């Protein structure tokens, strides 16, 4: 029963986020997209509270892999789509949730590692893009994707903060040096990821690093 309630709560939560994103559209399409990108990362708290195995935890992300792909093709959920499509970022977002749900709820049975990985994707990557565009700093290009020094530094700082908080809350002992190394690696991963692929490269890399280190 708790798992079914978790599914219902998940869809209500996602629906509320999408509706609230409409308020951000007056600040531009990118504002609504980043609001969704950051806010939806908090779904993992719902998953950890309600779901007790990988099958249940995977159902919502699996459905949104399909929904987001349809939206990408048909502009089904306009608030989360760019005016000009340049990648499957929204699909990768849901796909990373699916992969990490299967891995952390099922294979290693450590969903707290998934929590840290998804929060890094949501907050660190999301705010890196926002702050990178707000602050004037050195710009560089990877392929056709433009990156900024301010964005990369933001990625490093917020990733480090999330790892530090995560370590204290769940009791995972990560040395300071290890936390810095993980944050640097993820900053580099974000910098070299193009066309929305950071929505899968960052959380998968974070999950692997936290599990292995």
Image: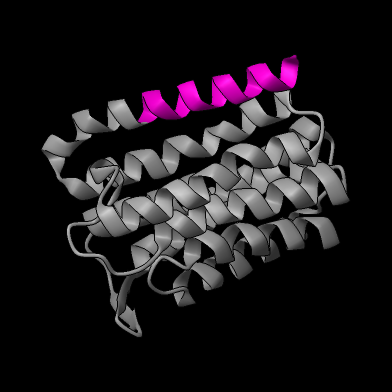
Quadrant (top left/top right/bottom left/bottom right) for the N terminus? top right
Q: Residue at x 71, y 46 (%)?
A: 101
Q: Is residue 171 left or right of residue 65?
A: right
Scheme of image coloration: one colour
Camera sees residue 135: yes
Q: Position of residue 24 (x, y in %)?
A: 21, 34
The relative height of residue 48 versus residue 205 in the rendered view (above or below) is above
Q: Residue at x 75, y 54 (%)?
A: 176
Q: Is residue 5 magenta?
A: yes
Q: Is residue 157 magenta?
A: no
Q: Is residue 70 left or right of residue 30?
A: right
Q: Residue at x 57, y 55 (%)?
A: 95
Q: Residue at x 38, y 29 (%)?
A: 17
- For the record, the magenta segment spans 1-17
Q: Is residue 54 left or right of residue 181?
A: right
Between residues 38 and 2, which one lies in front from this camera angle?
Answer: 2
């Amino acid at each position: 029963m708790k798992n079914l309630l978790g599914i219902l709560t998940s869809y209500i939560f996602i629906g509320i986020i999408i509706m609230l994103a409409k308020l951000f559209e007056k600040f531009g399409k990118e504002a609504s997209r980043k609001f969704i990108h950051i806010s939806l990362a908090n779904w993992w708290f719902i998953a950890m509270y309600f779901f007790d195995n990988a099958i249940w935890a995977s159902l919502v992300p699996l459905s949104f892999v399909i929904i987001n792909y349809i939206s990408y093709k048909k502009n089904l959920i306009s608030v989360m789509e760019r005016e000009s499509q340049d990648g499957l970022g929204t699909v990768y977002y849901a796909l990373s949730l699916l992969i990490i749900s299967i891995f952390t709820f099922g294979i290693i049975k450590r969903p707290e590692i998934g929590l840290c990985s998804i929060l890094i994707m949501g907050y660190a990557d999301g705010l890196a893009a926002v702050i990178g565009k707000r602050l004037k700093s050195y710009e560089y290009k990877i392929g056709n994707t433009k990156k900024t020094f301010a964005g990369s530094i933001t990625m490093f700082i917020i990733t480090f903060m999330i790892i530090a908080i995560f370590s204290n809350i769940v009791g995972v002992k990560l040395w300071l040096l290890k936390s810095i190394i993980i944050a640097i690696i993820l900053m580099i991963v974000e910098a070299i990821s193009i066309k929305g692929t950071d929505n899968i490269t960052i959380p998968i890399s974070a999950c692997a690093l936290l599990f292995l280190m």
